[in-house]
Image (cartoon, rainbow, N blue to C red):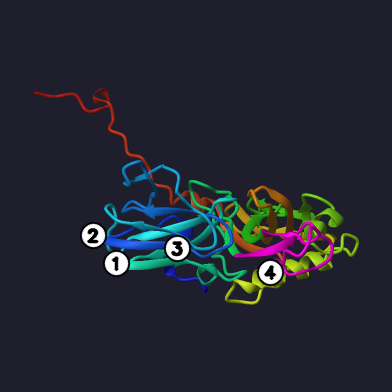
């Protein structure tokens, strides 16, 4: 799925459902290999979960839907044109958003509805309220099933003997990470900034041998088999070819000199697209996770700090009466 206006608004928190005018009925199906939390997006953009009476209320947990075909019919508090947002039940990562038409309809959350890898929305930008933006939202871009419990690759749906592993879920999520080489400069300041550029695996829950064992490949063959196994599994249920490459972390030292020739402080932010591959057991507990940073980093800026702060709404307060001219009558 390519990024569109609805997905962009959902990730930014600005998506809202239309007014409740015409009732509807919708059959919701989870066709992914992991459970989902499904929310109704109300007219204020709040994410709403169902209460005991079936009313969707802001602040409540989402409706948990099991993987592989779990379905539910939503009636009563269901309206034409409403938006339904799904998140990964395991991690809370954004999965997809769908809109139901008037009357009776069916909404299926599947691999088709997940955003394509690397197409996860724009880089976060500084605002007057948050000069240093948070990392971007985590986005689920693929799910699949991998073998678990053996180092001999066999089909997941084969149960010939005890050596054949169970099919367990694997997910791929991406987000924008603000890196440590970001910097700011005062007016007229010249600074030499030294930092390391990181590519490849940044963090792993375990070494390559135990991580490979979690997906049923050779424990001593390095990161290649893990990458191939996960990529193949993710591609099976995705509308695009999934190529996840996990390699040993490499770093290079960089030293650059920057000068602010302007009259105001400036801010430059470095962002890295970050991949997270996680394998879960049959109980939904993470077995292994690998975090990889994509190169190159993307520079956002220079941002004029004074200009950003000037966009903040000023609060006008009524002056005390004693500051006014005295009544001359």
Residues at circles 4 and 2 in contact by the CB criterion of under 8 Å: no
Marks 3 and 1 sit apart, C-alpha to C-alpha, by 14 Å
Provide the secondary structure element on which disc 4 rests. Answer: helix
Main SS of the magenta segment? loop
Above or below: residue 64 compared with residue 146: above
- Say whether disc 3 or disc 1 marks the residue closer to the N-terminus: 3
Q: Quadrant of the C terminus?
A: top left
Judge whether residue 30 is colored magenta.
no
Residues at circles 2 and 1 in contact by the CB criterion of under 8 Å: no
Marks 2 and 1 sit apart, C-alpha to C-alpha, by 9 Å
Tag count: 4
- Say whether disc 1 or disc 4 marks the residue closer to the N-terminus: 1
- Say whether disc 4 or disc 2 marks the residue closer to the N-terminus: 2
User: Which residue sits at x=60%, y=61%?
Assistant: 301
Task: Compare residues 120 and 66 and report the one nearer the observer.
Answer: 66
According to the image, label 1 marks what residue? 104
- Say whether disc 4 or disc 3 marks the residue closer to the N-terminus: 3
Q: Residues within 10 Å of mark 2 (few under 14, many from 20)?
A: some
The image quarter in which residue 328 lies: top left
Mark number, residue 23: 2
For the record, the magenta segment spans 142-168
Q: Residues within 10 Å of mark 1 (few under 14, many from 20)?
A: some
Q: Residues within 10 Å of mark 3 (few under 14, many from 20)?
A: many
- Say whether disc 2 or disc 1 marks the residue closer to the N-terminus: 2
The image quarter in which residue 222 lies: bottom right
Marks 4 and 2 sit apart, C-alpha to C-alpha, by 40 Å
Marks 4 and 3 sit apart, C-alpha to C-alpha, by 21 Å
- Say whether disc 2 or disc 3 marks the residue closer to the N-terminus: 2
According to the image, label 3 marks what residue? 29
Judge whether residue 159 is colored magenta.
yes
């Amino acid at each position: 799925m390519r990024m569109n206006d609805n997905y962009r608004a959902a990730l930014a928190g600005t998506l809202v459902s239309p007014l409740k005018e015409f009732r509807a009925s919708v059959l919701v199906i989870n066709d992914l290999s992991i459970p989902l939390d499904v929310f109704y997006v109300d007219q204020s953009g709040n994410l709403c979960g169902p209460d005991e009476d079936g009313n969707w209320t802001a602040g409540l947990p989402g409706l948990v839907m099991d993987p592989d075909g779990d379905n539910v019919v939503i009636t009563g508090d269901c309206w034409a044109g409403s938006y339904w947002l799904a998140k990964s039940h395991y991690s809370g990562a954004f999965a997809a958003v769908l809109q139901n038409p008037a009357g009776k309809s069916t909404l299926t959350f599947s691999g088709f509805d997940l955003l394509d890898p690397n197409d996860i929305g724009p880089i976060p930008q500084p605002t007057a309220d948050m000069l240093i933006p948070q990392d971007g939202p985590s986005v689920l871009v693929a799910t699949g099933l991998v073998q678990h419990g053996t180092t001999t690759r066999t089909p997941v749906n084969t149960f010939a003997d005890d050596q054949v592993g169970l099919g367990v879920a694997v997910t791929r999520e991406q987000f924008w990470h603000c890196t440590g080489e970001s910097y700011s400069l005062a007016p007229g300041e010249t600074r030499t900034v030294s930092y390391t550029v990181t590519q490849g695996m940044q963090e792993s829950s375990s070494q390559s041998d135990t991580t490979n064992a979690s997906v049923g490949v050779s424990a001593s063959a390095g990161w290649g088999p893990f990458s191939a196994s996960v990529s193949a599994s993710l591609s099976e249920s995705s509308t695009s070819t999934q190529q996840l490459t996990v390699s040993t972390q490499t770093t290079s030292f960089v030293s650059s000199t920057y000068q602010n020739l302007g009259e105001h402080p400036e801010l430059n932010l470095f962002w890295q697209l970050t991949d997270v591959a996680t394998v879960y057991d049959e109980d939904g507990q993470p077995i292994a996770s690998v975090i990889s940073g994509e190169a190159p980093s993307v520079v956002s800026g220079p941002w004029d700090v004074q200009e950003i702060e000037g966009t903040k709404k000023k609060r006008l307060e009524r002056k005390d009466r004693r500051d006014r001219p005295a009544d001359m009558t």
